[in-house]
Image (tube, rainbow, N blue to C red):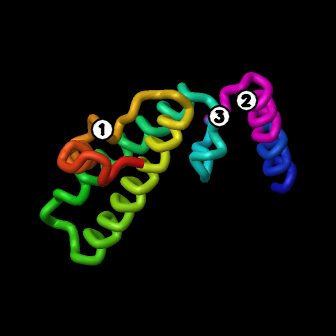
Amino acid sequence: MARNAEKAMTALARFRQAQLEEGKVKERRPFLASECSELPKAEKWRRQIISEISKKVAQIQNAGLGEFKIRDLNDEINKLLREKGHWEYRIKELGGPDYRVTSPLYGWLLRSEPGRWKR
């Protein structure tokens, strides 16, 4: 019995090692946006966050969800929106486009009173 489990573990370990060597392991998003120093990667992480937000917004529109699940999803969406803002700020620092100006959420604030909301 233990012999089969040992074989499976070694096969799994060899498979994992092969993935690491080939570079097929999925890269994780940095916890802090300031840890990213490459513009294309920062834009990739921003796009990933936007897709996560859109999935959660689609889930929250389900009428059959309970109140607590809706609150949890809303908290997660707010957290992702805040994180998206951090990535947009980092992209601007790295010399990329200023997504906050073109965003409907922030754009009208920036255009309403010159100098008031600029960062």
Residue at screen point 53% across, 34% down = 42
Q: Residues within 10 Å of mark 1 (few under 14, many from 20)?
A: some
Q: Residue at x 67, y 33 (%)?
A: 25
Residue under numbered circle 2: 19
> Considering only order in the chain, which callout, 2 or 1, is on the residue closer to the N terminus?
2
Q: Residue furthest bottom?
A: 68
Tell us which disc is closer to us: 2 or 3. 3
Residue 2: percent from left, percent from top:
85, 55
Q: Is residue 16 above or below residue 74?
A: above
Magenta segment, principal secondary structure?
helix
Q: Quadrant of residue 10?
A: top right
Q: Dot 1 corresponds to which residue?
A: 101
Q: Secondary structure at mark 3?
A: loop
Pinpoint residue 114: horizontal percent, then vertical percent. 25, 46
Residue with the mark numbered 3: 37
Q: Nearer the viewer, residue 8 or 66?
A: 66
Horizontally, residue 110 falls left or right of residue 85, namely left
Q: Position of 58 compared to 28: left or right?
A: left
Q: Which mark is residue 119?
A: none
The residue segment tinted magenta is 12-26
Verify whether residue 21 appears in magenta: yes
Question: Against 88, is 77 above or below?
Answer: below
Question: How far apart are the two marked residues, 1 and 2, measured between alpha carbons?
Answer: 41 Å
User: In the image, residue 89 lies at what x, y percent?
Assistant: 47, 43
Q: Residue type at mark 1?
A: Val
Relative depth, front residue between 63 and 74 = 74
Pick whichever, 14 or 117, lies toward us.
117
Cα gap from disc 2 to disc 3, whole angstroms: 25 Å
